[in-house]
Image (tube, rainbow, N blue to C red):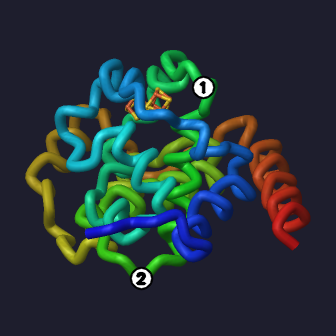
Amino acid sequence: MTVVFSKENLKLSKDLQTLTGENVMLCYQCKKCTLGCPSAYAMRMKPHELMRATQFGLAEEIYWSGAIWICLSCETCNTRCPQDINILRVIDGLREMSKESEYYNPYPAIPALHRIFMALVERFGKVYELGLALLINLRMLTPFKDIDMASPMLLKGKLKPLPHFSHGAKELRKVMARIRAMEKDRFA
Ligand code: SF4
Ligand code: SF4
């Protein structure tokens, strides 16, 4: 396959730069990010390959690899990059952009878990584990997954049957609302 820097395949890197402020074109493939990455062994597309694929606008291949969902967000790559690229921000941007994409994601449970986790934290100010487990099971159409573990954990008090609000829940909701307003202004 021949890939060239056409206007079409530069669109991905340009959109990412608008979204994250990071310029993936600065990457010169030194592989330092991959060599320090604790998840690289499990990624079908390693961090430096992800950067290369982004330069070439290969969105479909990137999303198909599922690598953006294997990343642990540890930021080791950022500290190693000689070009000062915030690779995690690039990955977060790709995660965000994948919401609008029609391309296949081999790990659909991970973004679903992320969305449910954030919604519960925003609602209660902290995570509500039982709600998280129930909602992700429903979302993935596996309503009885791990149900055998729930009763002993409930009996031992490791899982709370009802959610509790944290003291900072109200403030957190205000912060989230402010972030949303800033995002809206930025992309208006
Ligand atoms: S942030 Fe992600 S890509 Fe970077 S080193 Fe950590 S796991 Fe690897
Ligand atoms: S460390 Fe930076 S310059 Fe090197 S391959 Fe990774 S992203 Fe590219």
Q: Write the residue at 75% across / 44% down.
A: 172
Amino acid type at circle 1 is Gln
In this rendered view, identify the residue nearer to me: 131 or 98: 98
Instruction: Give the number of the mark in front: 2 or 1.
Output: 1
Q: Position of residue 95 (x, y in %)?
A: 49, 57
Q: CA distance from mark 2 to mark 1?
A: 32 Å
The x and y percentages for residue 96 are 56, 61
Front residue of this view, candidates 147 and 101 = 101
User: Ligand 1 appears in which quadrant?
Assistant: top left
Q: Nearer the viewer, residue 5 or 105?
A: 5
Residue 154, quarter of the rendered image: top left
In the rendered image, which quarter is residue 79 located in?
Answer: top right
- Which residue: 82% across, 67% down? 187
From where the camera sits, is residue 17 visible? yes
Ligand 2: does it lie within 8 Å of the C-beta at label 1? yes
Q: Residue at x 51, y 57 (%)?
A: 94
Q: Which mark is residue 83?
A: 1
Return the x and y of residue 163 as percentages of the image width and height.
Answer: 51, 50
Count of marks overlaid on the render: 2
Tag shown at residue 102: 2
Task: Identify the amino acid type marked 2.
Answer: Glu
Going from N to C along the chain, the mark reached first, 2 or 1, is 1
Numbered disc 1: secondary structure: loop
Residue 42 image point, x, y percent: 18, 39
- Residue sitting at 36 percent across and 77 percent down? 103
Marks 1 and 2: in contact by CB < 8 Å? no
**Which type of secondary structure does the marked residue at label 2 adopt?**
loop
